[in-house]
Image (tube, helix red, strand yellow):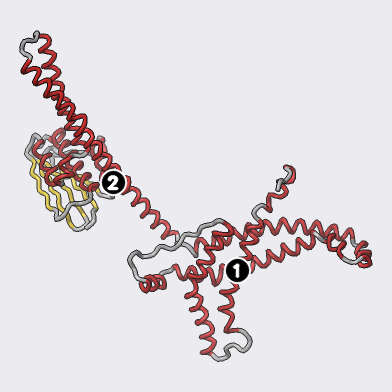
Amino acid sequence: MHIPTPLRPLLRPFENAGRAVAFHATGILVQIGALLVLALPWLPGGPTRVLSVLLAVFLPLAALVAAAPLLTAAQRARFRARLGVEIPRLSRTPGASRRERAANWLRGEAVWRQVAYHLVAGPLCALAAVGVLLLWAASLWATTIYVWMWAVPVEERLKFARYAVQAGYVTALGVCGLYLAAWLSTALARLDTRAAAGRLGPSRAEQLTRRVAEVTESRAAVVDAADAERRRIERDLHDGAQQRLVSMAVNLGLAKATLTDLPPDARKVIDEAHREAKEAIEELSNLVRGLHPAVLEDRGLDAALSGLAERAPLPVRVRVDMASRPAPAVEAVAYFVVSEALANVVKHAQASRAEVTVERFGGILLVVVSDDGVGGADPSGGTGLAGLTKRVASVDGTFSISSPVGGPTVVTVELPCAP
């Protein structure tokens, strides 16, 4: 229905009043069931002795505790259908049987939060809703008092004519009551929503725990996706650009060996092109190894670290003790930690030897890189060690370094992995 623009500000308080009234009416019906269970033993002819009084108190309370999941489901459906508010469900223990879930539920605080709502907050909100609905009814009657006056027989209508001025005051009071009822309906709905969210849904601590778990899972997915993308780029470079460069270098080598009658200038150009092609192949190989070495995926961490040690310009002792391979993302982090640490040893440590130890203790992969250099490494002095810290933190690992002046320097990394 089209509402004229000048009337819209006047009718704005009533926009959501209909949904709120239906919400409160449904809540009264739901709460009546819970209150009847508690009031049933106290109807006329109820308990008179001490034992029967205790039973009349505790048995309905036990019934309310048992019926709490059904009442909570009804309340969730009411909030969802009438207000469009979704109250989160409580998380269940995965893999637990129905009996175990029931025992955990009874031992937890969630059941008592729900009972507190159904026993205290819900009835109070329902009682307030009864008052609001009565205010609606009284305000509607007062607003339409002239209609009621004209609905009575003519002889009675003449008697009401002398009260026309008073009826105008009643009508104005009824209009004010309608606005007050609309405001109270929406305010009570917000109050009931806040009470239900804190007692029928997960607590603040449970929400934070669930959120942390979701963030941790999403971050792990991002790390896995980034690692998979690095492996894809490595394969594309290795199977595509690198092979083309190798083919070009071979052709230039054949041209240099077979075309012996070329002028010296042409042979010089071929020699230079051959040399640059081999240098490009070497740089591309280093880039591919920096992205994700193929030996790490094919043969594991032991072989990949052995390759790093062989390419290092100083003696590096490698010891790897793992009963099983960790996750690919953790394995890649361990490899790059060792690679960056050895690069720092070569550039800055002035060391004569280095040692790499990788051990797995249950759910922890321990990586230790040490050298006999001059020490004095400062994690805040450059981007290398800071980058290692961030890379280790991406899988919830811990990074520490001990590097006193004069040495030795020991880098220790602990990476979590499934046992």
Image location (x, y in percent) of residue 248: 15, 23
> Quadrant of residue 35 in the image?
bottom right
Total residue callouts: 2
Pick the front one: 247 or 409: 247
- Dot 2: few (<14), some (14–19), or many (≥20) neighbours within 10 Å? some
Residue visible at 82% across and 60% down? 170
Q: From the viewer's perspective, is 360 left or right of 86?
A: left
| Residue 110 seen in this snapshot | yes
Disc sitting over residue 124 in the figure? 1
Residue visible at 74% across and 59% down? 177
Instruction: Classify mark 2: helix, strand or loop.
Output: helix
Disc sitting over residue 224 in the figure? 2
Residue visible at 11% across and 38% down? 373
Image location (x, y in percent) of residue 38: 56, 79
Disc sitting over residue 331 in the figure? none
Instruction: Classify mark 1: helix, strand or loop.
Output: helix
Residue visible at 57% across and 62% down? 192
Image quarter hosting the C terminus: bottom left
Disc 1 residue type (three-letter): Leu
| Residue 379 seen in this snapshot | no
> Quadrant of residue 149 in the image?
bottom right
Say whether disc 1 or disc 2 marks the residue closer to the N-terminus. Answer: 1
Disc 2 residue type (three-letter): Asp
**Image: 255 above or below 243:** above
Q: From the viewer's perspective, is 128 left or right of 37?
A: right
Image location (x, y in percent) of residue 125: 60, 66
Q: From the viewer's perspective, is 182 left or right of 232?
A: right
Image location (x, y in percent) of residue 80: 54, 59
Pick the front one: 80 or 134: 80
**From the viewer's perspective, is the residue at label 1 or at label 2 nearer?**
2
**Image: 238 above or below 14:** above
Pick the front one: 150 or 210: 150
